[in-house]
Amino acid sequence: MSTRLDKAYSDGVSRGTGYEGQNVAVDDYLPPCTIEDVDRALFNLFNGEIPLFYEFENNMKRVPIIFATGERFAVLRRKKPLRDKAGALILPLVSIMRTDINQDAAMGPGQGSPAVIRKRLSKDDPKYQRLLNSRNLKFQDGADHPSHLADGSGNGTEDGKLATRRVDGSPDEDTRSGNHIKATLGTNIFEIIEMPPVKFYTASYEVTFWAQYTQEMNGMISALMSTYHNNHQRQFRIESDKGYWFVATVDASISPGTNYDDFTDEERLVKYSFNITVPGYLIMPDFPGSLNGLRRYVSAPETSFASTQTAGVPVDPVIGGVASSDVNSYILNDFAMADEPLPGQAIGADGIASTLRIAGVDVPGASVSTVDNRPSSAQDKKGADTPKNIEASVGGFSASGTTQQMLRVTHDPFTGKKITKVVRVKSRNQRKGETVYREGLTTDLGKI
Amino acid sequence: MARLFITPREIDYISDLTKEVTKDIIGQKIFYYTVREDLTTVHDVYEEAPEKVFNPPVELDALVEWQPETFKTTKFGSEETATIEVYLHARDLTDKDFQVRSGDYFSYGQLFFEITSVIADKNVYGQVEHQTGYKVTGKQARQGQINVKPLGPTSEAIDDPDAVQKTFVQQRGQEENSLGKTGDVRALQQNEKLEAPISKPQEVSNKGNSVTTDSSFYGDE
């Protein structure tokens, strides 16, 4: 995982890059904000915003702007030519040249983590609201209500209706008063769109005014100095065509590039230059090879903290911070799957137990690591990745996605001998009081 | 030289002599690719176009001053680049109503060149309205600036049918020769100061004696 584009999964350990997962928000579009947007915004400032004009044959003409510099064919054959028939430049002119891009921009939020840019009701929310029936509509077949239970006893649902075991409630005041379309937000399914972190930088430009006469130059400099948004800071609010805007700050000094002191054998030059700095930002730049960084998430409208009690002692692998340095932990490493977490290093962890776990044999004392510092080439094709199946457990229980391991004591049906085994819980049903253990490799702990 | 002695007839004579040397004897040519800025999508700020639209190539008779390629080894590795100077006859361009401009491209051999400058070379006997020709300087173009297969002759090391020029035909002021339209105009003939040549344009080609030589020579037919 050399770049943020290579990190394919979230792991709960490292900082999000914005490109994890396959949940690309394909229906949404965020205009990219690139270096070109800053260039264009500054170009537009001089080309259309600041009133830079000159008089020629009793006509007002806008001073041409050159963004230094284009291809020969394009510069030489503008619709409004910059040169006369002899090929000499027609003055006055303004040249803008980007001189630097500085990445050391200690500014702005959102550089560290993905940013939420949109939150809206999901397309599935209306269906959920029917199931929720938050207004407690009793006589609407499409709304979930306890009275729609068959026989009112919980044995199924009446035909063509939705039913629920939730407690019957009374319609709220708005419903009773007929205010059915009042907008409310409460328990809803929300769709959330995230974009990758923004990268800030500072672009520097050198702007040169070149005129034929000092009077023209005075007019151009006056136009610049009198049109700042903020006269104290000498700032312009420049905008790109996409709607992004930036703050351009003009340096205090406007330096002459004239040759008045000696132009014996040269053309008299009336030139002035100054620098402009623009703090800019990159938002999902669309360079060749770039990825769509918009991600879509759907909120969970209900969160349930349920506990399930299972007979037995939980013996989950110990979560270790770093990969184990015990060589015993890697004896059976050839059995490891590509995305298998490495053996961890933890207090009380046993290297043999950890390597047996890799081979599919569960033994108390195993440990797994939460980080994976192997190079990409040693891992799966998606690149280096931290373990995906590790979650914190509290009191021996963890989130539903994690396999629970229990210590079970049984008796050999033939010998009657007591056997202690570690088994994995396949499923649990608290309502029915049922726990299903997964059939698999188990080890008689009495033998090790 | 005084205009008293260099009359328009002398100017025509000098022009026709130049054409005779370049078109009927030397036979060097370049293929000129005009960039169609009106059809090309040019970036409005940066004024550049990665994908340019060109006119079909135009064959121009020229005097080519070939210069050896420059070999440089830098932090990017080794690189060969070529610069070339091409002299085009001013009257010939006028006759063809053709304009040579900086920023266009031309090929000579296997290489493409971007025209970096077009300079009027000299006046004819100090008469400012008569230019001898244009000195065109080209800098070797990189792949991406122009992506067209070069037209022959290119190199005898290449197997393409047109890699080696096997036929050279004089133009001699005729509207067409055996290769097609020439666009050639000889002023003295046009102004009826000279009659058209009695003989037809000569050629060097494979029509010659195959026993002793691969090609016919001037006057061998």
Image: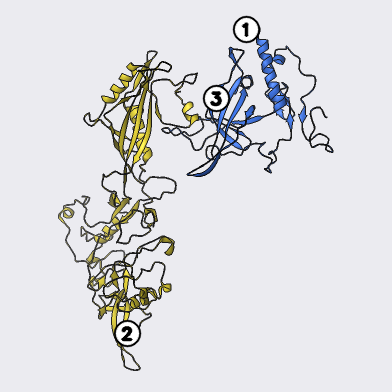
Chain colours: A yellow, B blue
The circle drawn on residue A311 is none
- Please identify the quadrant where the C terminus of chain A is shown: bottom left
Q: Nearer the viewer, residue A322 or A31?
A: A322
Q: Do the residues at discs 2 and 3 belong to one chain?
A: no
Tell me what residue is drawn at x 25 percent, y 72 percent.
A397
The chain letter for the residue carrying disc 1 is B
Say what amino acid the circle numbered 1 marks: Arg
State the image coordinates of residue A238 (x, y, percent, origin top left): 30, 34
- The answer to whether the residue labelled 1 contacts the one labelled 2, judged by CB atoms less than 8 Å apart, is no
Q: Nearer the viewer, mark 1 or mark 2?
A: 1
> Mark 1 or mark 3, which is nearer the start of the sequence?
1
The residue beneath circle 2 is A445
Estimate the spatial distance between the alpha carbons at disc 1 and disc 2, rounded to whole Å.
119 Å
The circle drawn on residue B118 is 3
Tell me what residue is drawn at x 27 percent, y 45 percent.
A106
Disc 3 secondary structure class: strand
